[in-house]
Amino acid sequence: MIATIIQRAVMQGIPLLYGSTGEILTEKSGHLNLGIPGIMYVGAISGVAGAFLYEQGVGPQNINPILAIIIAFLCCIVGSTIMGLIYCFLTVTLRANQNVTGLALTTFGIGIGNFFGGSLITITKLDVPSISLSETSKAFKTMLPFAGKCGWFGEMFLSYGFLAYLAIIIALVASYILNKTRVGLHLRAVGESPQTADATGVNVTKYKYLTTCIGSAIAGLGGLYYVMDYANGVWSNNAFGDRGWLSIALVIFATWKPSVSILGSILFGFLYVIPTYIPDISVSAKKLFEMLPYVVTILVLVLTSVRNKKENQPPQSLGLAYFREDR
């Protein structure tokens, strides 16, 4: 039972880890991207569209698992990166309000996802309002060959598809880059004081564009994981829930540290799934459990504000447009 709960918590937490890692990179450049829910949604539908067209083209029985993964993966990256480019163009080049742009991007992304999702559902001519990509999902969910022989250890740590391990690797690499490399130093300087970074020769615009687009691509993978792995390849409009917003909350919980977000995502996933294992739980009690990640985030925000440690605070220029002429 414990191994199963942990496994489900990890599976729930992986989309949050992708979203929070991407948002941490974006916020380290000084940009608050509230469009993460929409970006994750577009990443998911882009991967679904690529996989759907491939399966329809060759037939579900004839798909090449590796090619199916590559097509869905690349389509997801392209779709979510385009969303990141739109955000950058509006907030970096045109200096639009970041909060308004992010919220508009979320609404736009969900609308795009539902439009194309509905279109693909219409093509299938099925009575159910969903798309099932079972063969592609099997490729994404392929476990390590020896996982079943390791008992509870294999179930807890080795029974996931490659996207789950990729999320952890990306978070660890992002943490290393931010804290141990010159690129990370420049990025943190851009987020703290773009004027100072610009004066020392750092290309502020380049760093903002690159990190925001890379962060968006990473966040989009969270949407792809949810559909292909957690939901077994089934796409339904508006089925993603509040995972995008939980990813943003996780950024605060992790105090802008990608390595901490690994454990935070599992905790959030645990709080999300634990009601299903409580017998005879009421609907209202279940909703209270779903609120807990946000309550925990608020508590962490209060504690970090009271302690006022520099390393636990957001970048000083977060949410502020940079005008080079005002330097």
Image (cartoon, grey):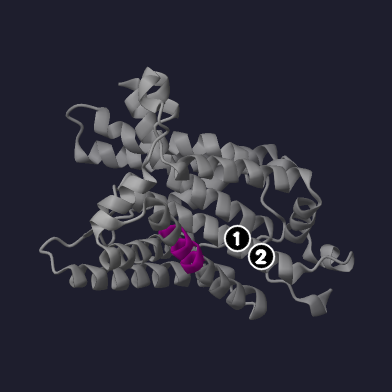
Q: Which residue is mark 2?
A: 210
Specify whether 48 is left or right of 217: left
Query: In the image as oriented, which residue stretches furthest toward the right?
Result: 200
Q: Would residue 37 be visible to someone looking at this image?
A: no
Q: Quadrant of the N terminus?
A: top left
Specify whether 59 is left or right of 184: left
257, above or below 84, in the image: above
Q: Which residue corresponds to the image point at 30% horizontal and 48% vertical from the top-left?
A: 231
Q: Which residue corresponds to the image point at 12% horizontal and 65% vertical from the top-left?
A: 126
Q: Would residue 260 be visible to someone looking at this image?
A: yes
Query: In the image as oriented, which residue stretches furthest toward the top?
Result: 151
Whether 317 is among the magenta residues is: no
Q: Quadrant of residue 191?
A: bottom right
Q: Residues within 10 Å of mark 1 (few under 14, many from 20)?
A: many
**Which residues lie in the magenta part?**
72-80
Whether 77 is among the magenta residues is: yes
In front here: 159 or 323?
159
Q: Which residue is mark 1?
A: 214
Specify whether 178 is left or right of 6: right
